[in-house]
Image: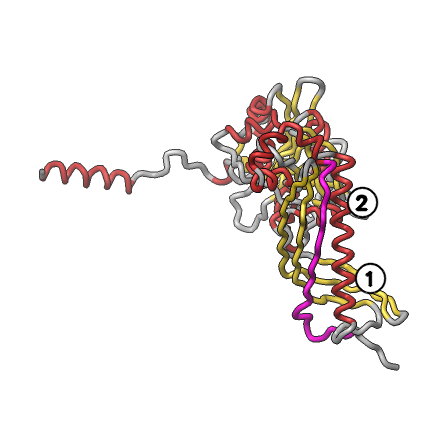
Amino acid sequence: MRSSRIMVLIVLTCMMLSGCWNYREIDQLSIVAGLCVDKKGENQYEFTVELIKISGENQTAPRSQILSMTGETMFDAARNIISTSGQKLYWSHANILIVSEEIAKEGIATILDWYLRDAETRPDIPIAIASTERAKDIFLMPEQDGDIISNRLSDTIKNHKGYPNFPPVEMWEFANHLGTEGVSAFTPRVVMVSSDKGLPPMVDGSAIFHHDKLAGYLSGLETKYALFVRDDIRGGILVEEVEMDDKIGKVSLEIFDSKTSVKPTISGNDITMDIKVETVVAIGEIMGDIDFIDEPGRSILEKEAEESLRENIIAVIKKVQEEYACDIFAFGDEVYKSYPKVWDKIKGNWQNIFPDVQVSVTCDILIENSGLTSRPLKVTH
C-alpha cells in the first residue's frame, strides 16, 4: 500500500516538473490570420494566407505577410505552402475564410471538407464570399498603417450588432445549413471600395446559395431587411423620411431590440407565412424642422417607420423568391415545425413551392428613450 502511494507521488511530480512536449518559440511560428481560396486552372486550388509575423523584440508591432501556393486539393495546397513559409502553419488563430466567386458558383462544399475535418483548424471562424475577380486581391491591397486585413474583417463581422447589413455566419453554421432541408445558406460578402489610399475591403451584403452553389447577391440594405425576417436584428439604424405640416425631415432611429415571429398557415395548396416584427427604437438624429416629442409627431413617425419597414421586408422576400428561389428565410423549417406531416409530402419539391409562398407582414415600432430631446435643433440669429 505504501509503495503504491510513493509511486503515485513520483508520477505526479514528474508530470508537474515536465515541460510542454510541443513547445515552440512564438517567433518560430507562422500564425495564420486569414485564408483566401481561388481556383487555379481546371484542377488546382490557390491558397493565399495572411500570416502574422511576430518579432522577439518587445517594441515591434505584429505585421502581416502574404503567401500563395497551389495544390490539387485544399490539403495539398495547405502543405505545399510550407515550402514558401519555411515553417508549418499555425491555424488555430485564423479569423476568416474567404472563398472566390468562381469556386462558390461551382460548389463550395468540396473545399469545406478539409477545413472541417482537420484537427488543427477551427470550424467557428466566419466564412465569406469575395465578389471580386480573385479572392486573393483582398489580401493584396496596399497596406493601411500596418493593418492586418483578416483581423479587421473578422472584427467587423463580430460587431455585426451595430451594422446588420450582412449575416454573421460561422463555417459550422454554414455547413449545417447546407445539410438542412427547408433552409438555404447565405454568407457575408466582401467587396472592395475605392478610396484615395487604395481599395480597402469591407463586409457588406450577402451571398445566397442554392444547395452549395452561389445563386446571387443581396445588397447591404436588402440583407438588413432579410435579417429582420430571420429574427437576427439586435441593433443598427433605420432612416426614415417623414413629411408633416408641409415640412420634410429625415430621422435616424436607433434599434434597441427587435423580435420577429413567423407562423405558417396552410389552406388547400396555398401556404402563407404570417410575419410579425416588433421593434424598439430611439430617435438618434433629426435632420429637418419637425417636432417628434409630442403627438401627433411621434405617432406619425412610428406609423411611417412601420410602413416603410413592412414594404422593404416584402420587397426583399419577393426578390429572393422571384430571382433566386432560395429559402434563406427558413420558411420551410417553419412549415416542418408546424405541419410535419405536410412537410414530409412537399419537402422534395420545396424549391418549386417556395416562390409561390404568400407573405403577410405586420410591423410594430415603439419609440422609447430618445436622448435629451426629440425636438430638432434650432438655430436663432
Q: Is residue 281 above or below residue 91?
A: below
The residue carrying pointer 1 sits among few (fewer than 14), some (14 to 19) or many (20 or more) residues within 10 Å by Cα, namely some
* Gap between marks 2 and 1 measured at Cα: 28 Å
Q: Is residue 217 above or below residue 231?
A: above
Which label was assigned to residue 241? 1
Taking the magenta stretch, the answer to whether it contains residue 270 is: no
- For marks 2 and 1, the one nearer the N-term is 2
Q: Nearer the viewer, mark 2 or mark 1?
A: 1
- Looking at the image, residue 86 sits to the left or right of residue 250; the answer is left
Nearer to us in this view, 248 or 268? 268
The residue drawn where x is 84% and y is 72% is: 289
Q: If the image is split into quadrants, where does the N terminus sit?
A: top left
* Location of residue 40 in the rendering, given as x and y in whole percent from the top left corner: 70, 22
- Three-letter amino acid code at disc 2? Ser
Q: Position of residue 70 (x, y in %)?
A: 64, 23
Residue shown at the point (70%, 41%) measured from the top left: 206
Examine the image and state in which quarter residue 34 appears: top right
Left/right of residue 19 with respect to residue 34 in the rendered view: left
Report the residue that reaches farthest toward the left: 1
Residue with the mark numbered 2: 194
Dividing the picture into quarters, in which one does residue 280 lie?
bottom right
Q: What's the residue type where badge 1 is placed?
A: Glu
Q: What colour-coding does the image apply?
A: secondary structure
Seen at 24% across and 40% down, the residue is 12
Residue 341 at least partly seen: yes
